[in-house]
Amino acid sequence: MNNLLFLIAFNIVIVAVSGNWLQSCLDRHNLYRRRHGKPLMTLDSKAISHASKRARELSSRCAFDHSGNSGSGFGENLAGGNADCARDVDMWYGEIKQYNPRNPRFSPSTGHYTQLIWRSSTRLGCATASHCRYRHVTVCSYYPPGNYAGRFNENV
């Protein structure tokens, strides 16, 4: 996996995913999932392709918006500013400070955290691309997606 390098050029947008960068994403996700007794994630080629497509799309549109209920079948976390995936995952995990386990539910202020540790999400793909406003945009795609209403008790 360490020798893997995807370069996808679209107009002037370059999406890069190296094996080392992907491994750092996976390792940091699993560090936090282990802390909460959740199943470890594995890298998934379809999730990597989806994350690459989303990073390319956000870069080419100079946008920074979640895909929402697009029907893609993937959950999604976004970060902007740097291309350090471990740091991005740390930022998402930092939302734990706002999460109330006595009232398990979705909140925009904790959605990255809950997706990151969502028990049934076990496959991961991440990608990064240059971005007009944030220098870089990082997208992580999760399968199956998390953050379903009524399922927080058993997944977070």
Image: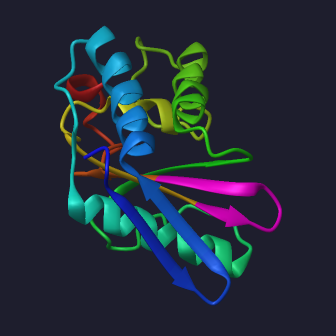
Residue sitting at the far front: 3
Closer to the camera, 112 or 60? 60
Q: In this view, does 137 lie above or below 34?
A: below
Q: In this view, does 80 lie above or below 68?
A: above
Q: Which residue is drawn at 31% across and 51% down?
A: 3
Q: If the image is split into quadrants, where does the C terminus sit? A: top left
Q: Is residue 64 visible?
A: no
Q: In this view, does 36 lie above or below 132?
A: above
Q: Is residue 134 magenta?
A: yes
Rendering quarter of residue 95: top right
Q: In this view, does 137 lie above or below 14?
A: above
Q: In this view, does 87 lie to the left or right of 77?
A: right
User: What is the x, y in percent for residue 108?
Assistant: 59, 41
Q: Main secondary structure of the magenta part?
A: strand
**Image x and y of residue 130, in percent:** 68, 64
Q: In which quarter of the image is residue 56?
A: bottom right
Which range is magenta? 129-139
Q: Which residue is drawn at 30% across and 21% down?
A: 33
Tell me: 56 left or right of 143.
right
The magenta stretch spans residue 60: no
Q: Which residue is drawn at 83% across and 62% down?
A: 133
**Going by the picture, which residue comes out furthest to the bottom?**
11
